[in-house]
Image (cartoon, rainbow, N blue to C red):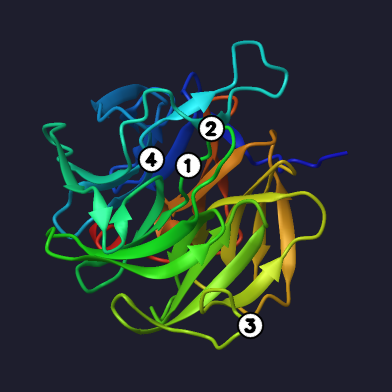
């Protein structure tokens, strides 16, 4: 029997596969609605306002040094049909796939600007999650796209917020999804969806990986991998450096210590919790996207969240 925390409460419903939550200083929360192609603001009372409509598949979101919202746009998904017993969820590349890209949104006007469509080794395929460093740049995962008989190999990229630089820093990596930085900024964490593995990459500088030797497949250090059938999605870190990964199929938030020695699960009320962020006073409030059922939920968290560059300074 799943024991969902009694403190978990729903604050918004009727969303079309929400993801990429960003808790803002005024108490509202930004989410993307991947199925609707929008960036949506949810007020503390649950009221919903569309901020921008970039189309495609807006996925991860983060506030940049200019106060604008930076989006990973995966170009669009194909979805389960209405009434599917597994719920509303993505099942492949959209028939009208519009190409992967990084966009930035002016939150005051809703204007959407395409910042990047390709990196050092070709077009972006399915940008997914994003995290800013303190140097004016950001890391993002490109999970790739799935088609009927083939699947892209994934990568991790680093880019400057001013549009002046983008480069691939990790390749190949299988379905990279969640991405986050350690409290000291020296380690980049990346979660793989299909393997339910969490990897750590030592950083030599902004956008520079210090790779582990063979047999690491891409220069990362394996932190943890789950037994059984689970799928990792997006993630956030708490102030102690624990990695909190939204976990599909089992329907939980998996909390992994920095060394991988301790792993715990906080059950969620559906199989498709896709992301988590922290906000509120002292960053002690967790916001979780319950995507298949179209909800945003919140609960008190056991530890403060890790302050995010460019966002937490505004809180």
- Give the labeled residue for mark 1: 145
Q: Secondary structure at mark 4?
A: loop
Q: State the image coordinates of residue 219 (x, y, percent, origin top left).
A: 51, 79
Q: Earlier in the sequence, mark 2 or mark 1?
A: 2
Q: Earlier in the sequence, mark 3 or mark 4?
A: 4
- Give the labeled residue for mark 2: 92
Q: Secondary structure at mark 2?
A: strand
Q: Can you name the residue that lies furthest to the top here?
A: 83
Image vertical order of residue 4 relative to residue 184, above or below: above
Q: State the image coordinates of residue 59 (x, y, percent, origin top left).
A: 40, 41
CA separation in Å, label 3 and label 1:
26 Å
CA separation in Å, label 3 and label 4:
30 Å
Tell me, yes or no, if residue 309 can be seen here.
no
Residue drawn at (73%, 66%) of the image:
263
Callout 2 touching callout 1 (CB < 8 Å): yes
Callout 1 touching callout 4 (CB < 8 Å): yes
Residue drawn at (45%, 64%) of the image:
180
Select label 1 or label 4 by which is in front: 1
Q: Residues within 10 Å of mark 3 (few under 14, many from 20)?
A: few
CA separation in Å, label 2 and label 1:
7 Å
Q: Nearer the viewer, residue 40 or 285?
A: 40
- Give the labeled residue for mark 3: 215
Residue drawn at (11%, 32%) of the image:
109
Q: Nearer the viewer, residue 62 or 278?
A: 62
Q: Residues within 10 Å of mark 2 (few under 14, many from 20)?
A: some
- Give the labeled residue for mark 4: 74
Q: Secondary structure at mark 3?
A: loop
Q: State the image coordinates of residue 113 (x, y, percent, origin top left).
A: 14, 40
Q: Earlier in the sequence, mark 3 or mark 1?
A: 1
Image vertical order of residue 249 relative to residue 200, above or below: above
Q: Is residue 184 left or right of residue 237?
A: left
Select label 2 or label 4 by which is in front: 2
């Amino acid at each position: 029997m799943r024991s969902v925390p009694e403190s978990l409460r729903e604050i918004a419903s009727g969303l079309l596969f929400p993801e990429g939550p960003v808790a803002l200083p005024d108490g509202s929360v930004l989410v993307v609605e991947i199925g609707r192609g929008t960036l949506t603001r949810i007020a503390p009372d649950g009221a919903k306002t569309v901020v921008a409509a970039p189309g495609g598949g807006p996925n991860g979101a983060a506030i940049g040094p200019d106060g604008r919202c930076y989006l990973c746009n995966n170009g669009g998904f194909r979805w389960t049909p209405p009434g599917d017993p597994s719920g509303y969820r993505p099942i492949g590349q959209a028939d009208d796939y519009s190409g992967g890209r990084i966009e930035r949104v002016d939150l005051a006007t809703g204007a959407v600007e395409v910042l990047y469509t390709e990196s050092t080794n070709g077009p972006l395929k399915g940008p997914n999650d994003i995290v800013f460093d303190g140097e004016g740049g950001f890391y993002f995962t490109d999970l790739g796209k799935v088609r009927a008989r083939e699947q892209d190999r994934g990568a991790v990229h680093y880019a400057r917020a001013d549009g002046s630089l983008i480069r691939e820093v990790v390749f190949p990596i299988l379905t990279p999804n969640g991405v986050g930085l350690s409290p000291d900024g020296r380690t980049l964490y990346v979660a793989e969806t299909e393997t339910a593995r969490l990897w750590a990459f030592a950083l030599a500088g902004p956008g520079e990986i210090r790779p582990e030797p063979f047999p690491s497949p891409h220069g990362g250090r394996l932190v943890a991998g789950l037994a059984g059938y689970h799928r990792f999605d997006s993630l956030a870190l708490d102030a102690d450096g624990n990695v909190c990964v939204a976990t599909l199929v089992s329907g939980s938030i998996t909390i992994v210590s920095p060394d991988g020695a301790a792993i715990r699960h906080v059950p969620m009320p559906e199989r498709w919790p896709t992301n988590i962020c922290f906000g509120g006073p002292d960053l002690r409030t967790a916001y979780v996207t319950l995507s298949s059922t179209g909800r945003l939920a919140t609960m008190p968290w056991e530890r403060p969240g890790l302050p995010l560059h460019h966002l937490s300074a505004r809180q």
